[in-house]
Amino acid sequence: MLPPLLLTLSALTLTHVHAQVPDPPGLGFGPTYLMPRTSSYLIGYSTTLRVPRYPGTSEGLAVVWPGINTDARPTNLVQTIVGAERARRSSCLGKATGQQWCAFTSTNIGITQQKSGKGIPVEEGTDLFITYKYDETTKQFTQTLSIDGKEVSRQSLAVGKGTRFNTAVEVQRGFSGTIAAHSADPGFPGSLRVGRGIVASEPVTADGGKVWTVDEILIPDSKYGSARAAASPPKAS
C-alpha cells in the first residue's frame, strides 16, 4: 500500500498577475505553484488564503484557488475558490456586491461538471482557512472553509485519491484586468513572538515585505509538571 502524505502551508498570498484572455472558450492562468504527481497519495491539506484586492473589471470570470488533483481520469480537482464577477454571481447569488469576492468550496468533476458548496461574500484582507481531508473509509474528500474560526462552507465528495497539489489564479470568458498583490509589510519581523529556547532563522523577503520566508524553526524539549484541574463550574440551581 502506498504511504499517505499530509501537506500543510502556513499561508498563501498572491503576487501581481495581469491576464488578458479571449472570449469563450478562453482560459488563462497566472503564475502557479505546482507539485508533481506523487506515487503516493495526499490525505490532507490546509492553508490560509488572504483575499486580494478586487479586480477592476466587470467582465468575464476570475478565481483564485488552492487545489488537489485526484487519480481519476480525466482528473477531478478539489478546489476551494474565491471568485470575482461571474463566479460571485453564480455562487453567492447576488449577495456579494461592490468590491466583495465570493468564497466557496467546490469540486471540478472531469472537464464538464462543477459542484459547489455554499458561497459567502468576503472582503479584501479576509483570511480564509481552508482544509481538505481524505477519508479512507468513505473514500470522500471533505473540504472546509472557515473564517475567524467559524465554518462557513463544506463539501464532501468521493472523487478519488489526491495525487498532486497546485494553486492558480484562473481567468475565463473575456476577463482582462489585474489580480493585485498584497501590500508590503516591512515591519512584519517585529510582530513575531519567539518563546524562550526557540531558535529560528531570520525572516527574509525578496519583494520588499509582501512574502516572508523563515527557513527553520527549532523548538526545544518541553517539560511539564502536574497541572491543577480547573475548578468545575457551579451547577445551575
Image (spheres, grey):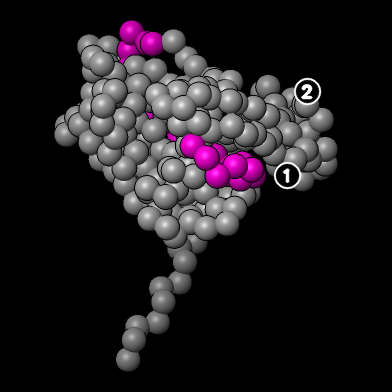
Asked whether 73 or 59 is in front, the reply is: 59
Label 1 – label 2 distance at C-alpha: 22 Å
Residue at the disc numbered 2 = 206
- Amino acid type indicated by mark 1: Arg
Please identify the quadrant where the C terminus is shown: bottom left
> Can residue 141 be seen from the camera position used here?
no
Estimate the x, y position of residue 128 in percent, counting from the top left.
51, 46
Residue at the disc numbered 1 = 193
- Amino acid type indicated by mark 2: Ala
Secondary element type, mark 1: loop
Q: In this view, does 114 lie above or below 27?
A: below
Secondary element type, mark 2: loop
Estimate the x, y position of residue 110 in percent, counting from the top left.
26, 23
Please identify the quadrant where the N terminus is shown: top left
Q: Is residue 209 above or below residue 21?
A: below
Tell me which corner region of the image, top left, top right, bottom left or bottom right, holds residue 39: top left
Query: How would you rate the neighbour count of disc 2 (Cα within 10 Å): few for under 14, some for 14-19, many for 20 or more?
Result: few
Asked whether 42 or 1 is in front, the reply is: 42
Count of numbered circles on the image: 2
Mark 1 / mark 2, whichever is N-terminal: 1
Tell me the magenta residue range: 37-60
Q: Is residue 96 magenta?
A: no
Q: Residue at x 39, y 33 (%)?
A: 79
Tell me which corner region of the image, top left, top right, bottom left or bottom right, holds residue 161: top left
Q: Which residue is drawn at 58% across and 25% down?
A: 20
Q: Is residue 157 above or below residue 167?
A: below
Q: Residue at x 31, y 42 (%)?
A: 116
Q: Is residue 39 above or below residue 67?
A: above
Query: How would you rate the neighbour count of disc 1 (Cα within 10 Å): few for under 14, some for 14-19, many for 20 or more?
Result: few
